[in-house]
Image (cartoon, rainbow, N blue to C red):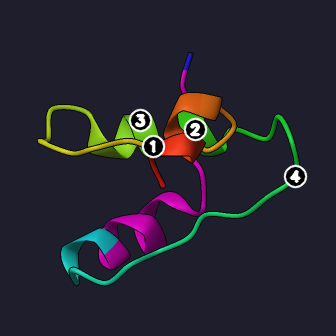
């Protein structure tokens, strides 16, 4: 179940502006879920730097 978040609209605005955004927050608060929800159905690259393979590519 997805709960609408206050941060959803500002994230959409940043994505629409073609600016780079960084989403920060405490562990387990729904950052990944928020991004996946907002980007659903769009062509996007999603990198999670908690995964070593992504880190090593940068």
Q: Estimate the x, y position of residue 12 in percent, counting from the top left.
A: 33, 65
| Magenta stretch encompasses residue 6 | yes
Q: Secondary structure at mark 4?
A: loop
Residue lying farthest front?
A: 56
Q: Earlier in the sequence, mark 4 or mark 3?
A: 4
Q: Residue at x 58, y 45 (%)?
A: 55
CA separation, marks 1 and 2? 10 Å
Q: Estimate the x, y position of residue 37 in percent, counting from the top left.
A: 39, 36
Residue lying farthest top?
A: 1
Figure check: 7 above or below 35: below
- Mark 4, residue position: 26
Q: Which mark is residue 47?
A: 1
Would you say residue 13 is visible in this rendering? yes
- Mark 3, residue position: 36
Q: Estimate the x, y position of residue 45 in percent, counting from the top left.
A: 27, 44
CA separation, marks 4 and 3? 17 Å
Figure check: 33 above or below 56: above
Image marks 4 and 3: residues in contact by CB distance under 8 Å: no
Image marks 2 and 3: residues in contact by CB distance under 8 Å: yes
- Mark 2, residue position: 32
Front of the two marks 1 and 2: 1
Image marks 2 and 4: residues in contact by CB distance under 8 Å: no
Crowding at mark 2 (Cα within 10 Å: few <14, some 14-19, many 20+) = few
Image marks 1 and 4: residues in contact by CB distance under 8 Å: no
Q: Residue at x 43, y 66 (%)?
A: 11
| Magenta stretch encompasses residue 37 | no
Q: Secondary structure at mark 2?
A: helix
CA separation, marks 3 and 1? 11 Å
Name the side, left or right, on which 54 lies relative to 5. left
Asked whether 48 or 32 is in front, the reply is: 48
Crowding at mark 3 (Cα within 10 Å: few <14, some 14-19, many 20+) = some
């Amino acid at each position: 179940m997805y709960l609408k978040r206050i941060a959803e609209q500002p994230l959409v605005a940043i994505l629409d502006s073609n600016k780079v955004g960084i989403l920060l927050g405490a562990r387990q608060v729904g950052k990944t879920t928020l991004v996946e929800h907002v980007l659903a159905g769009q062509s996007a690259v999603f990198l999670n730097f908690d995964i070593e393979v992504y880190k090593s590519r940068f």
